[in-house]
Image (cartoon, rainbow, N blue to C red):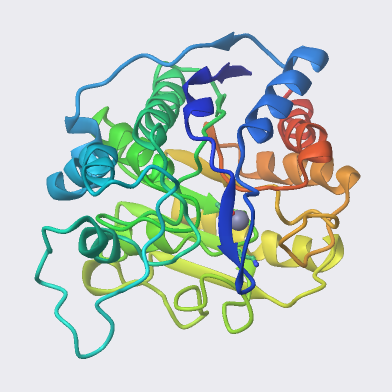
């Protein structure tokens, strides 16, 4: 399997995040991608190549131009206010406040475009996010070119980012950008299977009214877990997209037998949907020792998970999302990919 990686991600190097009522050590850190890369090299999973660059049009298929400009200009504006540390929003247009106004002040802009206070922005965030999107696009191109699979080692992750919102450590929605690109390149329909521990609220929102992108997600029940405000079983798509969203919220403590059952349902539905390609939003935070999550998958289970994914026999683009147990992250991630490849062979 060909792998796409860019060292640009190291420019997004947050030190702290707001979590559990405190300023705590950031968990979405450069060592995450480095350890996965090291494991790929150690196991000889496949050739690692740099991303190609793409015109901004590829991003505009998913994100608004205002939002992209905000991300690009953010650091200059932040510095202009005399700030130089990491940025967090602290005020939002909640109920009763205006969402149609985009303030000029950077604190107002942060609140307009953010949906949580847990996603630090730094000087290099835009460069890293842009490279991450290019990694996803390049992986998509590899599969469009005829390979049966590819892995985009994206960082920062993407599945929480909406058309004009950031949060959950995500700024550009890499999986959504890859999906639109594949549709542009002639695919008729794409399925996105999101197996990150957290619901992929951004991806769902981007495609909820679309019938050419089937979004399927297995995740911790939002009644108890982040992102709390999307990912319930009664969300099935809207308008033309009715029936093209499927959520499988699962309880804390979900282990492989339970997870496999839900995955099996999801894969049956994907099989019936008959898309041309599968994009897997690959989060490894379902791991039993993940520091911020509460599922119970073991390192060995990730091999089985990869094998299951090949059951639908579709060309597959893997896009790296969450997973914060850095020490085991490389093994867990590569286990999914080798489990998939062994099955395919
Ligand atoms: N106390 C992804 O996995 N904050 N994002 C958790 C825990 C948000 C996770 C706070 C977690 C976002 C891509
Ligand atoms: Zn996650």
Q: Residue furthest front?
A: 82
Q: Residue furthest bottom?
A: 96
Tally of numbered discs:
0
- On screen, residue 37 versus residue 294, left or right, reads left
Would you place residue 165 above or below residue 178 in this image?
below
- On screen, residue 304 versus residue 231, left or right, reads right
Closest to the observer, 153 or 247 = 153
Res. 210 in view: no
Residue 149, quarter of the rendered image: top right
Res. 149 in view: yes
User: Where residue 31 appears, x then y in whole percent?
Assistant: 68, 31
User: Where residue 145 appears, x then y in whole percent?
Assistant: 41, 16
User: Where residue 147 appears, x then y in whole percent?
Assistant: 52, 18
User: Where residue 175 appears, x then y in whole percent?
Assistant: 43, 42
What residue appears at the point 16 percent right and 59 percent down from the top-left corner?
105
What residue appears at the point 67 percent right and 25 percent down from the top-left corner?
34
- Quadrant where the image shows the N terminus: top right
For ligand 1, the image quadrant comes to bottom right
């Amino acid at each position: 399997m060909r792998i796409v990686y860019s060292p640009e991600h190291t420019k997004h190097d947050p030190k702290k995040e707001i979590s559990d009522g405190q300023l705590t050590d950031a968990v979405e850190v450069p060592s995450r991608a480095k350890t996965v890369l090291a494991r790929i090299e150690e196991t000889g999973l496949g050739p690692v190549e740099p991303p190609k660059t793409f015109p901004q049009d590829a991003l505009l298929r998913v994100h608004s131009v205002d939002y992209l400009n905000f991300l690009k200009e953010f650091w200059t504006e932040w510095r202009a206010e005399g700030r130089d540390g990491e940025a967090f929003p602290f005020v939002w247009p909640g109920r009763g406040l205006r969402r149609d106004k985009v303030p000029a002040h950077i604190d107002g802009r942060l609140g307009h475009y953010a949906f949580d206070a847990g996603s630090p922005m730094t000087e290099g965030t835009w460069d890293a996010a842009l490279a991450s999107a290019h990694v996803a696009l390049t992986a998509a191109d590899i599969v469009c070119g005829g390979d049966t699979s590819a892995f985009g080692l994206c960082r920062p992750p993407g599945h929480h980012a909406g058309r004009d919102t950031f949060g959950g450590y995500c700024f550009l929605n890499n999986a959504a950008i890859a999906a639109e690109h594949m549709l542009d390149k002639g695919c008729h329909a794409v399925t996105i299977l999101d197996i990150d521990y957290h619901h992929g609220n951004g991806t769902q929102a981007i495609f909820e009214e679309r019938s050419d992108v089937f979004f399927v997600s297995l995740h911790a029940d939002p009644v108890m877990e982040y992102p709390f405000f999307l990912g319930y079983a009664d969300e099935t798509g809207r308008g033309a997209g009715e029936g093209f969203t499927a959520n499988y919220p699962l309880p804390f403590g979900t282990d492989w037998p339970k997870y496999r059952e839900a995955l099996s349902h999801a894969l049956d539905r994907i099989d019936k949907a008959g898309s041309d390609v599968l994009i897997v939003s690959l989060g490894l935070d379902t791991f039993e020792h993940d520091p911020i999550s509460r599922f119970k998958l073991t390192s060995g289970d990730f091999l089985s998970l990869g094998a299951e994914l090949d059951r639908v026999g579709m060309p597959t683009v893997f896009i790296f999302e969450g997973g914060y147990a850095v020490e085991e992250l490389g093994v867990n991630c590569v286990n999914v990919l080798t489990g998939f490849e062994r099955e395919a062979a």
